[in-house]
């Protein structure tokens, strides 16, 4: 807590004295889960996490954002009380400057970015991002991700460069071009990842394909793609999620692809429970496929039920279901969920959990 106070006090003083506009936003999440591990040993834990963000407009062309995360703190594991050394992590600290002469925006510092599906990255990073719109609907980004510095006085660091262009119209279409250089491993990768999104009445679709050239001791090629579809019929929603990757798969930075499963993937309401997921489409030694279907329906006002079932090649099959409850609209939400999985090695796993989230 002392670390957080030492960080926040000078920031609040500076912002309070000089800011034209000032906003606070945040999220507090508490989760509990009971489950068995891959060895079928029973257990469980409770954890909580607090995110606080401060946004300040220092000038009409200059904004500043600062955000910290306290947690994820597992109850009884060196946290849960003042003075117990809870983890305080600065997640965002960047300047956002509008360059009028080029009609472009530049961000510098520690910030957040994700590709459309989180296949390659969905995380915070240190670096530089330049964005510019051409005409009415061509949006572009040029991003430098400083992935690793290693020894500060040696040329052994790692960098990733990302170019993103997207035509924003009734059917958004775009592409990512990524080049990574990892000096210590003497490895480079070049990724091309086009995508499209469409909505037609009750149907929506997001689709991405990728080609990944991995240049190390040998040059390898990976191919694949992912698609998410949703049919909203008012009385219920149906969804499908498909991911396929060839041998060698895709080079990632910090991915967080959500397929809606809990034991064999990353679920919406408990992102730290996954037992077997890892990143099975990165550097995989054989063909990989994940197929998931889901449904969501209202039981009554402020209460929805959801369920999903899916199969991951060489991993296993899972079914899950739960309830979403809005306790206070646009502020306080609760979810309860359960999952059961059968591993290809005939190991059975279960999970029961609940999450409370405040968003402000």
Image: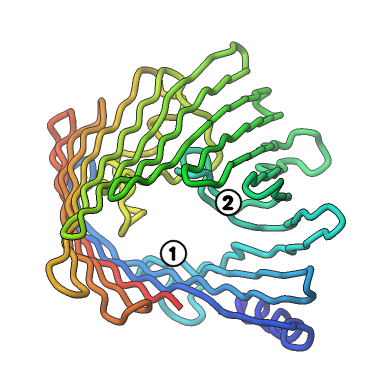
Percent across and percent down for residue 245 are 39, 24
Q: CA distance from mark 2 to mark 1?
A: 20 Å
Residue ID at (69%, 37%): 161
- Residue 31: quadrant of the picture: bottom left
Label 2: which residue?
Answer: 113
Residue at 52% in and 38% down? 173
Q: Residue at x 46, y 28 (%)?
A: 209
From the top left corner, tell me how far across and down residue 244 is, in percent: 35, 27
Quadrant (top left, top right, bottom left, bottom right) of the N terminus: bottom right
Task: Specify whether 169 is left or right of 189.
Answer: left
The mark that comes first in sequence, 2 or 1, is 1
Front position in the image: 95 or 78: 95
* Residue 42 can be seen, yes or no: no
What residue is at 53 percent from the left and 46 percent from the top? 169
Q: Tell me the quarter of the picture where residue 185 sits.
A: top right
| Residue at image mark 1 | 72
Q: Residue furthest top?
A: 218
């Amino acid at each position: 807590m002392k670390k957080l106070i030492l960080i926040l006090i000078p920031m609040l003083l500076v912002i309070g004295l000089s800011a034209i506009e000032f906003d606070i936003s945040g999220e507090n999440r508490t989760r509990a889960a009971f489950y068995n591990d891959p060895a079928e040993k029973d257990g469980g834990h409770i954890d909580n996490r607090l995110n606080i963000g401060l946004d300040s407009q220092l000038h009409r062309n200059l904004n500043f954002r600062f955000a910290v995360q306290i947690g994820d703190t597992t109850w009884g594991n060196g946290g849960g009380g003042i003075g117990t050394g809870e983890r305080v992590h600065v997640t965002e600290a960047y300047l956002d400057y509008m360059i009028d002469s080029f009609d472009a925006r530049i961000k510098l510092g520690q910030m957040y970015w994700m590709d459309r599906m989180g296949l390659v990255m969905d995380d915070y990073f240190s670096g530089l991002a330049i964005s510019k719109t051409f005409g009415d609907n061509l949006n572009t980004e040029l991003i430098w991700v400083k992935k690793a510095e290693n020894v500060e006085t040696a040329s052994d660091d790692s960098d990733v460069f990302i170019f993103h262009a997207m035509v924003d119209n009734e059917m958004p279409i775009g592409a990512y071009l990524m080049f990574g250089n990892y000096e210590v491993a003497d490895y480079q990768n070049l990724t091309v990842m086009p995508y499209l999104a469409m909505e037609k009445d009750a149907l929506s679709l997001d689709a991405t394909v990728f080609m990944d050239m991995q240049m190390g001791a040998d040059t390898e090629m990976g191919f694949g793609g992912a698609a998410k579809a949703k049919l909203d019929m008012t009385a219920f929603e149906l969804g499908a999620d498909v991911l396929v990757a060839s041998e060698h798969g895709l080079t990632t930075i910090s991915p967080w692809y959500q397929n809606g499963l809990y034991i064999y993937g990353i679920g919406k309401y408990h992102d730290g429970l996954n037992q077997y997921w890892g990143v099975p489409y990165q550097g995989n030694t054989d063909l990989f496929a994940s197929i998931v279907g889901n449904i969501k329906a209202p039981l009554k006002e402020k209460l929805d039920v959801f369920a999903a079932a899916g199969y991951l090649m060489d991993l296993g099959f899972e079914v899950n279901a739960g309830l979403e409850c809005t306790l206070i609209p646009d502020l306080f939400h609760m979810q309860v969920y359960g999952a059961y999985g059968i591993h290809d090695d005939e190991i059975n796993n279960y999970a029961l959990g609940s999450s409370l989230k405040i968003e402000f």
